[in-house]
Amino acid sequence: MKQGNYEKNSITLPGAVGLGTGVMIGAGIFALLGQVAEITGYLFPLSFIVGGLITVFSAYGYAKMANAYPSAGGIGMFFAKAYGKGTVTGAAALLMAISMIINQALISRTFGTYSLQLFNIGSDSFLVPVLGVGLIIFAFLINLTKNQFIEKFISIISILKIIGIAAFALAALWVSNFTFDGVLTGSAPEHTSINFIASLALTILAFKGFTTITNNGAEIVNPHKNISRAIAISIAICAVIYFLITWAVSSNLSVAEIIEARDYSLAAAAEPALGELGVWFTIGIAILATISVIIASIFAVSRMTAMMTDMKLIPHKHFRLPGNLQQHMLVYVAAIAIILTVFFDLPRIATLGAIFYLSMDIMFHWGILTRLKDDINAKASIVISAIILDAVVLGAFLWYKITTDLLITIVSVTFVLLIFISEHFYLKKQPPEEEGSHSH
């Protein structure tokens, strides 16, 4: 049944899992593995494990909120429940939406990087953003179709992707006799502890795709049960895949080799283990993975931002575009993702995404702790743990980036402040009864 811009009961449990894994398995392995290794050295497999454990604490709050308040707006509606329809809600929801758009840029450049490995063209080629922009446009067109088609398309690709990645990992491990000899050995950074904690910001980012499920809550069949199930299943699948991949890569490449091939480390790991055919197979899986990530992410963000407009938290102009509100948001989301893809490289895109997401996540759990824990029957100890873990990781990551890339740190913090300031003045200008009106 269609309600406004959304189709109730149009996404099944497998479809919701496909959306979650569709976003998660892509950023974490293909785009971030090499960056994590660069930060924390031989401890990078452990970083993914700990990042997954921290994500479990965070996912608890989202599952509780989604079960209580299933909504196509996801995070936006959750913040409205905690803080009311004001600056904090609008700004925090925008942080989440923008972090997801940043993830789209991250994945689109990863798509370009891996695709060019078929022709031995480096990751610094101008063709990387060109191919990335092409992928975003393709995902935009797919998202103009019906929910059922999108669900089936993403689910099929996600299944193929998971099978392919698992096959690569098991084949690479078989070639290395399933040895742990290369795991947790090699060079380590000078400040091992702080670097390891900082690296968790990126591995948490690798798991954050589960929030995509909450952004489609009103469209999921039996949402009060299936949202939390989909979140748990998605995180479990990704944890297993990440474990196998990091084990396989560290068994076939040294840390130095992983860092050298930072933007395409899986393809580099396939060559010594499986030869040229293995490289081609891995690149093919990477292409499938990145396609599913972009489609699933644009699908979720367009619904989230449409709901924020319905909630009168952000402005919207039609610009004489045809279609409904959600389709208009598809245009805006794709346009922003294209701009980020063209102007930022992979490490800086990942930095922006991690800072935005962790900042939003702390505010989200603070809202649960101080306002909603009794309403949704959430355990304060788990919510407090999520806040502390996020804050420690964010602090370490900011310190690491200040010492290695001060410019992107300043840009990230400035963007966060600008989002809050612009949201405050936008809402202040609106008449009380029409705050954040949907302008034409």
Image (spheres, rainbow, N blue to C red):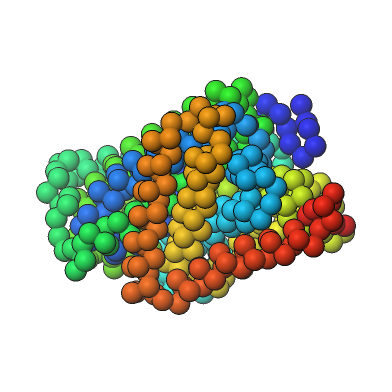
Left or right, 252 with reference to 133: left
- The quadrant the C terminus occupies is bottom right
Left or right, 95 with reference to 274: right
Q: Please state the horizontal and vertical placement of residue 331, each as a whole percent of the image.
A: 72, 57
Residue 115 is at least partly visible in this image = no
Q: Residue at x 45, y 58 (%)?
A: 354
Is residue 28 or residue 52 the one in the foreground?
52
The quadrant in which residue 310 appears is top right
Name, please, the residue furthest toward the front.
370
Q: Please state the horizontal and vertical placement of residue 211, each as a whole percent of the image.
A: 53, 42
The quadrant in which residue 379 appears is top left
Is residue 256 or residue 9 the one in the foreground?
9
Q: Residue at x 43, y 52 (%)?
A: 205
- The quadrant the N terminus occupies is top right
Q: Residue at x 30, y 45 (%)?
A: 50
State how many labels appear: 0
Q: Please state the horizontal and vertical placement of residue 213, each as a whole percent of the image.
A: 56, 37
Is residue 208 or residue 315 the one in the foreground?
315
Q: Is residue 215 above or below residue 400?
A: above
Name, please, the residue furthest toward the bottom.
407
Q: Residue at x 52, y 50 (%)?
A: 363
Residue 89 is at least partly visible in this image = yes
Q: Is residue 26 above or below residue 150?
A: below
Name, please, the residue furthest toward the left.
181
